[in-house]
Every structure is written in C-alpha cells, then in structure tokens.
Image (cartoon, rainbow, N blue to C red):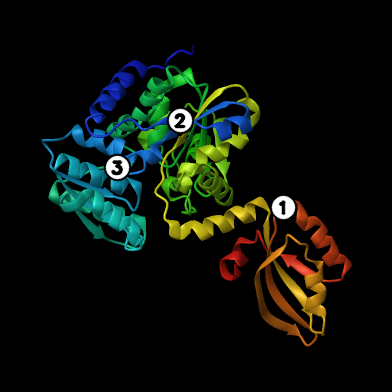
Amino acid sequence: MRERPDMSDEFQMGAIAATRAMRAVFPATPLLKNEHLSERFGADIYLKREDLSPVRSYKLRGAFNAMRKVIPDQRVFVCASAGNHAQGVAFMCSHFGVRGVIFMPVTTPQQKIQKTQMFGGEHIEIRLVGDYFDKTLAAAQAFCATEGAHFLSPFDDDDVIEGQSSVAVEIEDQLGGMPDRIILPVGGGGLSAGVRSFFGDRVSYTFVEPVGAPSLGEALKAGHPVDVSPINSFVDGAAVAKLGARTFARLKGADPADVVYLSEDRICVSIIEMLNVEGIVLEPAGALSIEALGDVADSIKGQTVVCIASGGNFDFERLPEVKERAQRYSGVKKYFILRMPQRPGALKDFLNILGPDDDICRFEYLKKSARNFGSVLIGIETKSAGAFGPFLKQLDDAGFTYTDITNDETLAQFVI
C-alpha cells in the first residue's frame, strides 16, 4: 500500500461527501470488467463507464458539486461550452431549478445545441456568440460581470475538481480496493487532477492526450501551463490549448514519462473496435484510455487496470470520417496519385494487378499532365495491411509511376 500524499485526507473527505450528495441525483456509473481487452493484454481490464451517466459524460459531476456549494445564495449560472460541459450544466440547472445561460460558438453543431436544450429545458437559455471559442468565453465572462452571475469553469475550479474526483471514489468502492493502474484522458485537467488528488501515490497513472493538444505534457516540461495553440479539435472532449492553473497545481508532480500521446487517426481504431465488438458508443476523448492500453501493454501483465471511458456523446454523422481515419491508420486503406498511360489497355493492365481482396473505393481523373499520360486519384481498400507490399511491387514491375498520399495531411484535406 503506497502512502497518501499531503492534503489527501482533507481532499478525500470532500470527495466522499460530494459523491454521497450525488446519489440523490444519479447513480454511480458502472465499473465493468472487459473480457475482450483483458484477454488481449493479459490483465484484468475494467472500464469506468462515464458514457452511461445521465448526460453520457463525467462533466455533470463537477457541475453538480460547484453549483451545490453556492446555492441558494446564487441562482444564475453561466458557462461557455460547445460540448459535454454545457450538457452537464444544463442538466444540473434543471435539477436545482435555477437559471442557466449557456454560451456556445455560432459554429456549434445543431445536435449539440438540441441536446443541451433538452437537458436544461425551460431553465436554460442558449446564446450563440462568436465563430471561435475565445469569443464565446469572453462573452460569457462579460455577462457574468454585468449580471452578477456565477461562472462555471469546465475544469479550472477547485469545486469542479472535487466533483470529478467522485469517479475515483466510486472506482475504489466498486473494485473493493485499489487498481494497480488508472488510465485516463486529459484535456483541461479537471478529471485527472481530481482522480490523482484522491488516489495520490497509491496507484500508477497513465495520462493520455491527443497529439494535437498536448497541454499536460508541455506544462510538465515547462513547469507551468503553456498555450499549445493551434490545436487539433478532432478529439473535442480533450482538445484544450492550455491546462488550468488549479489543475496543474495538482498534476505538476506527475512523471512526464506517464503521459502518452495518441494520433487522432489512431484513436479512431478504438472507437470502431468498441462499437463493432462490444456495442459501446464512445466519443474520441472517451476512447483515449482504451487505445492507450497498447502503449503500456508490457507493464500491465497480470495487473488490475481501470480505463476511464470519459464520454459517449458521439455524433453518428462523424462515423464515416472516423471509419476512414481508422482504416488509414490501420494500413488497410491507401490513396495514390497514379500516372496512367493514355493508351488502350492501360487501365486493364492496372486492374489485373489488384488482388481478390482489393477494392477500389475512389477513382478520379485529376488532370492530364501530358499528351500521353493522365493523373488519377485512386483509393484502394483491402483486408490486410500486408497486402499492399505485393501490390506495390507489381506496380513497380509493371512500370507504373505513383505517389502514396495517404499520410499527406495537406493533400488529404483537398482530395480525400
């Protein structure tokens, strides 16, 4: 049993009290052993299913705790969010019967606006302000200053951090003790700060960030929060440009070696796998901890590991993009610019090179670069990444000229 850190006792008492208070609003989310992952990694892998909360993410925990601390003195609450935080605040405004004003960017998808309105009902007002989040945030804070409303930070607030720590309280209770390792996603740091403050050094940690928003990793290197803009917003639940000051104060002792960075395309592999194999719907941030198992596979053999599936607010209109990214990362789908001779039979010669499991998923003439040749964008999907080796060798032997553009992000934005 590892020793508890300083401040742990006081923080734990607050976390336990917050967790008990939550039971009047919603039940504990399940902690479920996943046999599929346990067998693959030779460990006891449990998923903490925050995707099964009333708003399909852990965010309502922090919103609940921060609001209960100031009610009844405060009756108007404000947040700036286009995602899970907005839905958590809306849910709690309805529960407490208080007014909420939720600022969202003008570019927020209609599905997220509708879900937020559904959770908040008549108790909330949604204001669409700004094309980018910084304008939205400034409008929310200006409203608070003029109206005397209470601003609810998505992560950089001690009461929010305490509320998120209820995830750890439930894990210890449900598991009947300590896991060997906790794997959890990091955005602004509210969840990770809460969990680490509760468990202290009694467990090992793996903190997972998308490569396009490495706010924790860069903060640990610099010794303070730094702005990592511009960020990739694909993993929207963890795409935060700067770690919170309060969250960093609780995470600054973390080992930088415990931070794992995952590419946005790689995360899509776990989203598709969990949907197809387990029937579990996860948003990109919710899949971070599961995909990171591959990075710690050698060190978790025989251990008890908890992956926090932080959310399942997935817009199925994104599914084609997620599948596309997963296939490209897995190597079963590639795109080429092919220089096709302009002669009878050239296309047939190319088609004869394809194997029985190779499927053309895109074929488009881009331009004729010369009288005797034309440029073709071609996408090929196969069952195994290894099939491309023999295929490309046959292209070379046949004298075809081609360029693999699968991983060229600039070209992909325009032609794929």
Q: Residue at x 30, y 22 (%)?
A: 16
Q: Earlier in the sequence, mark 3 or mark 1?
A: 3
Residue type, mark 2 in image: Leu
Whether residue 395 is visible, yes or no, is yes
Q: Disc 2 versus disc 3: distance between alpha carbons?
A: 30 Å
- Element under disc 3: loop
- The residue sitting at the bottom extreme is 371
What residue is pinned by disc 3?
Answer: 153
Q: Disc 3 versus disc 1: distance between alpha carbons?
A: 46 Å
- The spot of residue 397 in percent (x, y) is 88, 66
Q: Residue at x 14, y 44 (%)?
A: 98
Residue type, mark 3 in image: Ser
Q: Earlier in the sequence, mark 2 or mark 3?
A: 2
- The spot of residue 283 in percent (x, y) is 45, 48
Q: Disc 2 versus disc 1: distance between alpha carbons?
A: 32 Å
Whether residue 150 is visible, yes or no, is no
Q: Residue at x 44, y 39 (%)?
A: 225
What residue is pinned by disc 2?
Answer: 32
What residue is pinned by disc 1?
Answer: 384
Image: 355 above or below 94: below
The answer to which image quadrant residue 152 occupies is top left
Query: Residue 332 vs residue 153: left or right?
Result: right
Image: 191 above or below 344: above
- The spot of residue 255 in percent (x, y) is 54, 28
- Crowd class of label 1 (few under 14; some 14 to 19; many from 20; radius 10 Å): few
In which quadrant of the rendered image does the C terminus lie? Answer: bottom right
Query: Residue 1 vs residue 340: left or right?
Result: left
